[in-house]
Amino acid sequence: MNKAKRQAVIAGNWKMNKTRPEAKALIEELKPLVKDAGCGVVICVPYTNLEAALEATKGSNIKVGAENCHWAKSGAFTGEISADMLAEMGVEYVVIGHSERRQYFGETDQTVNQRVRAALDAGLKVILCVGELLEQREQGITEEICGMQTKVALGGVSKEELSRIIIAYEPVWAIGTGKTATADQADEVNGFIRSVVAKLYGDDAAQALTVQYGGSMNAKNAEELLGKEHVDGGLIGGASLKAEDFSVIVKAASK
Ligand code: 13P
């Protein structure tokens, strides 16, 4: 079993939720609940909450991430935030290529790749999201889609840099729908993504890679999903907004 050698990481993706006072309150509630975690714990929060989150998590085992970053170092990109800006603040992680960015904000595999490279150049760790739409699953092209998204996103990324990447498999049909992939479905695609990475970087690098599952993971189904060989953690939306639920998922990953 290689799973035991990999670091399990449970990351919350708060999406567009929580004002600063709400963010501080949630983190204060979360800290004691996850302090003995046997896995990595990350919260990815809106830009406006980053400073408060960094302050509130100081001295704790909770790491802070952003939910996106731009690919350019600086320049005329009104409304955007660069990877350097995040790194300078002390932010450690950034989510790239989330399906909501692909769906609502014109994100493409190519811009995902540019953002991944900018984040790595700035010294950040990346949570790279890939996943198929419902109709793509029904057409039987889940592997083609996830394989392509993974390969394009990793273009130009060195083997050394790969160690700062987590891949999150998030089937789009399972996000925010309450419709979770079965543990076997998650394991199958996560394992496939690992095989794609093995072809690009070799077996050792692929076996060391943390591959999360995301999509309606919650306090009830986390244990079964996280028990699978290729499911090394989770990227949690809705359930990350409730300290108690998030901490149950963290505990399930700590076993
Ligand atoms: P839900 O857990 O709310 O389905 O969201 C998953 C997700 O998109 C995490 O990035």
Image (cartoon, rainbow, N blue to C red):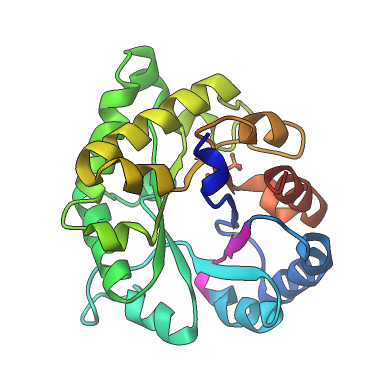
* Residue 183 on the magenta segment: no
Which residue is drawn at the image coordinates 31% and 40% (left, top)? 203
Of residues 250 and 208, which is closer to you in this image? 208
Of residues 130 and 47, which is closer to you in this image? 130
Residue 8 vs residue 136: left or right? right
In the image as oriented, which residue stretches furthest toward the left? 156
The range drawn in magenta is: 40-47
Of residues 71 and 248, which is closer to you in this image? 248
User: x and y percent of residue 14 in the render?
Assistant: 60, 57
Measured along the vertical axis of the image, is residue 216 above or below residue 251?
above
Q: How many marks?
A: 0
Residue 8 vs residue 57: left or right? left
User: x and y percent of residue 56 in the render?
Assistant: 70, 80
Residue 116 shows in this picture? no
User: x and y percent of residue 28 in the render?
Assistant: 79, 72
Rendered-image quarter of ligand 1: top right
Residue 57 vs residue 119: left or right? right
